[in-house]
Amino acid sequence: MSNSNIQTSELEWIEQVRQLMTDLARYSLADIPQLPPSVSDRVSPLLERAKVVQKDTALTPQQREWVDSVRKLLLELFAQTLSDRPHLPDNLDRRALALADKARQLQDTAAAPPASEPAPASEPPAATANTNPIDELRQQIRREWATSNNANAPEWQQLMNLLDVAEGLYRRAKG
C-alpha cells in the first residue's frame, strides 16, 4: 500500500477502519465505556475486506503488521458482538487510537505527491485554496509531538483522536 500501489478500494477500507477505530476509542473513553451501537453492522464487512487486503503482495512489513492488528481487533469485536455478555476488549481505547493514527498516516502517505515530483515552490502551503485547516493543525501537532520530551504520553493520541472528530464535523459542515 505504498503511494503508487494503493488502490481506491483499499483507501476506502482504510478510511472505514479509521472511522470505526475513532468511534471505538470515543465510546471506550466515555463515562460509561461500551461498544458503539452499530459495531456489529460495521465489523463484519471490514473483517471480510481485511482478508483481501492481507493478501496484497505490495504491502510493506509495517503495513502488513497494521492490517494484522486491525484484523485481530476486528475478530475480537466480532466475537463480542456474538457474546451473550459483550464487554470491551482489553486496552481498546489505546489500541483503537493507535490503529486510527496509523490509518491516518497511511492515508496521508497515499495522498502525498511522489518524492520524484516536488510540490510547486512558488506557492506556500498556507496559500492554497483547498487547504484544510484541520490538516494544517494536525501537521503542526505532529511536529510538536515528535520533539516533545513526553512523546509517549496518551494525551497525544487523545489529541489526534479529537482532531479526527473535529475533521469529521468540519467535513459535514462544509458539505
Image (cartoon, grey):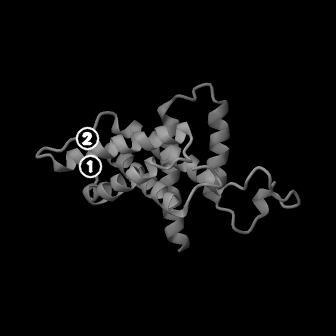
| Three-letter code for the amino acid on which mark 1 is drawn | Leu
Residue 151 image offset from top left, x and y in percent: 57, 29
Q: Is residue 107 left or right of residue 147?
A: left
Inspect the image, locate mark 2, and give the three-letter code of the amino acid beneath it: Leu
Q: Is residue 12 left or right of residue 133?
A: left
Considering every residue shown, the one lying at the far bottom of the view is 175
Residue 93 sits in which quadrant? top left
Q: Are there few (<14), some (14-19), or many (20+) residues within 10 Å of tag 2?
A: some
C-alpha gap between disc 1 and disc 2: 7 Å
Mark 1 near mark 2, Cβ–Cβ under 8 Å? yes
Mark 1 Cα shell of 10 Å, populated few (<14), some (14-19), many (≥20): many
> Which residue shows up at 62% across the image and 25% down it?
149
Residue at the image point whose x is 62% and y is 35% from the top:
145
Q: Is residue 63 above or below residue 13?
A: above
Mark 1 or 2, nearer chain start: 1
Q: In the rendering, at what x and y percent does residue 47 appear?
A: 34, 52
Residue that mark 2 sits on: 88
Q: Tag on residue 35? A: 1
